[in-house]
Image: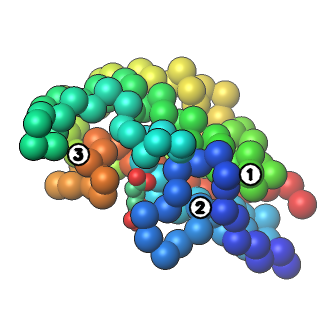
């Protein structure tokens, strides 16, 4: 049974002691990942004041980037977006962001048919408004 740890060049670096993904047999488990831009760690659309406090954020920009980050981890793992089977989505403000996120999710995931769960959480690491936790099933 394959048991591989994946560290993806094209995805934002993990913020702790964990890999981007781990394959166990036909299943590929992705670590939770947010919308940081890989090369810069910037969060697209975030506006901060002089003290570094977050003033506003753009959920659409964050959705596009986090979906791209998931794709980068899958590709580095030899998997495709269409291999996703289960997606858990964490939002920090369901009332504000669900509709936009749900629309962009439909665009990005319509051909995937992965199961999905969306929950609101009080906070996420790295000042992000969305994080995805994914499982894929990969042909051997
Ligand atoms: O990818 C990010 O920007 C933040 C995600 C962090 C985690 O999921 C974690 O620290 O476990």
Q: Is residue 138 left or right of residue 86?
A: right
Query: Closer to the camera: disc 2 or disc 3?
Result: 2
Separation of disc 1 and disc 3 at Cα?
28 Å
| Residue topped by disc 1 | 76
Which is more N-terminal, label 3 or label 1?
A: 1
Give the mark nearer the N terminus: 2 vs 1: 2
Q: Nearer the viewer, residue 41 or 111?
A: 41
Identify the residue under disc 2.
20
Q: Which residue is mark 3?
A: 92
Q: Residue at x 53, y 36 (%)?
A: 67
The front one of 137 and 68 is 68
Name which quarter of the figure residue 114 lies in. top right
Residue 124 location in percent, x, y?
A: 28, 55
- In terms of sequence position, does the residue under pointer 2 or pointer 3 come before the other? 2
Does 86 appear above or below 28? above
Answer few, some or many: residues within 10 Å of disc 1's Cα (few below 14, many 20 plus, some between 14 and 19): some
Quarter where residue 16 is shown: bottom left
């Amino acid at each position: 049974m394959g048991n591989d740890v994946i560290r993806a060049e094209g995805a934002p670096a993990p913020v702790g002691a964990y890999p981007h993904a781990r394959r166990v047999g036909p299943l590929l488990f992705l670590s939770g990942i947010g919308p940081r831009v890989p090369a810069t760690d910037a969060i697209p659309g975030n506006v901060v004041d002089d003290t570094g406090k977050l003033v506003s954020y753009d959920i659409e920009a964050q959705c596009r980037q986090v979906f791209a980050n998931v794709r980068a981890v899958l590709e580095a793992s030899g998997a495709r977006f269409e291999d996703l089977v289960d997606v858990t989505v964490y939002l920090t403000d369901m009332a504000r962001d669900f509709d936009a996120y749900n629309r962009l999710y439909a665009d990005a995931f319509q051909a995937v048919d992965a199961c999905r769960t969306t929950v609101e959480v009080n906070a996420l690491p790295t000042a992000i408004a969305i994080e995805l936790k994914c499982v894929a099933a990969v042909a051997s």
